[in-house]
Image (spheres, rainbow, N blue to C red):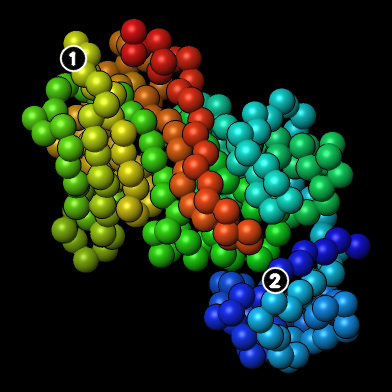
Amino acid sequence: MDSIKIVVKKEFDQMNVKELLKCFNVGKGKIEEIRNNFSIKINKEKASLESVVSTKDEVTFFFTEKIDYTPYSLKLDVVYEDEYLLIVNKPSGMLIHPDKEDNDKTLVNVVASYYYENKIFRNVRYVHRIDEETSGIVIFAKDFITMGLLNDMIINKTLKRYYLALCHNKFKNLKGEINASIGRDRHQSNKYRVSSSSMSKSAKTTYEVVKEYKGYSLVKLLLDTGRTHQIRVHMSYFNHPLLGDSLYGGKKDLIKRVALHSYQVKFNHPITNEYLDVVCPLHEDMKRLEK
């Protein structure tokens, strides 16, 4: 049997365990699963969802989970790991999760293999996604509480995600903010566009030019929202499509894939509150274009 332990912070004093879990962004379905299948202890004493907690109490959840994806053995590039988090460097050309039943060579399958090799018998939980051609950082949560807290941090924008992109052309303004809603392209199902329709969703990207080259620029971007293809759509809309991004007007003469890299994440650890600043250097195919 596995377990996860949390220490109750002052703001949760005198809540019951169920209320505590709701504050951790744990959904109703998971709470009912905990009621039916988990054991709970407060300071090593048997407890329930209705038990009241006090500041500095240790609440432990005992459970049994399994690895829920087919393992695919491939070397995993681990950028950061502790008992709650796994942050990995995804190669370009790999999907995050299967898009059809017979695809078992995605990132979650590689993480499943890593879990199996390291005797981590937990569900594989990715916190966010990046496109197939995008390289770099992807965060996994090793338990349901860490997952809920990280989801809440993304919603409340306290988890900062930075990207590096190689964009066509020089920028008139070296720093800026793009605030433009995004919706599906009516004429091409796999494409998105800046749109003012009622079906579009708000999207905000902050950018800063790091270095300029002949005909293109290295740009650091901060996602304030996480819409599908957000960076690619916003950069293309302002006449700076990404190198290699033929879907949005980029050319493939210098690089054969979308020149986008999930470069850095900054956040306070959801369990320990330690400040984390995790960086993943550019992959070689983008790095060679900096020379």
The N terminus lies in quadrant: bottom right
Residue at coordinates 33% horizontally, 21% vertically from top-left? 244
Which amino acid type is marked by label 2?
A: Val
Which of the labelled discs sits on residue 7, or is there none? 2
Image location of residue 67, percent across then percent down: 79, 50
Q: Nearer the viewer, residue 141 or 47?
A: 47
Question: Within the image, what quadrant is residue 206 found in?
Answer: top left
Residue at coordinates 82% horizontally, 55% vertically from top-left? 66
Image location of residue 109, percent across then percent down: 70, 39
Image location of residue 10, percent across then percent down: 59, 79
Disc 1 crowd, CA 10 A, few/some/many (<14, 14-19, 20+): few
* Residue 97, placed above or below residue 59: above
Dot 2: element: strand
Q: Is residue 193 left or right of residue 124?
A: left
Q: Is residue 24 left or right of residue 216?
A: right
Q: Which residue is mark 1?
A: 215
Q: Are marks 2 and 1 in contact (CB under 8 Å)?
A: no
Q: Is residue 289 left or right of residue 139?
A: left
Residue at coordinates 22% horizontally, 14% vertically from top-left? 213
Which amino acid type is marked by label 1?
A: Gly
Q: Is residue 164 visible?
A: yes
Dot 1: element: loop
First in sequence: mark 2 or mark 1?
Answer: 2
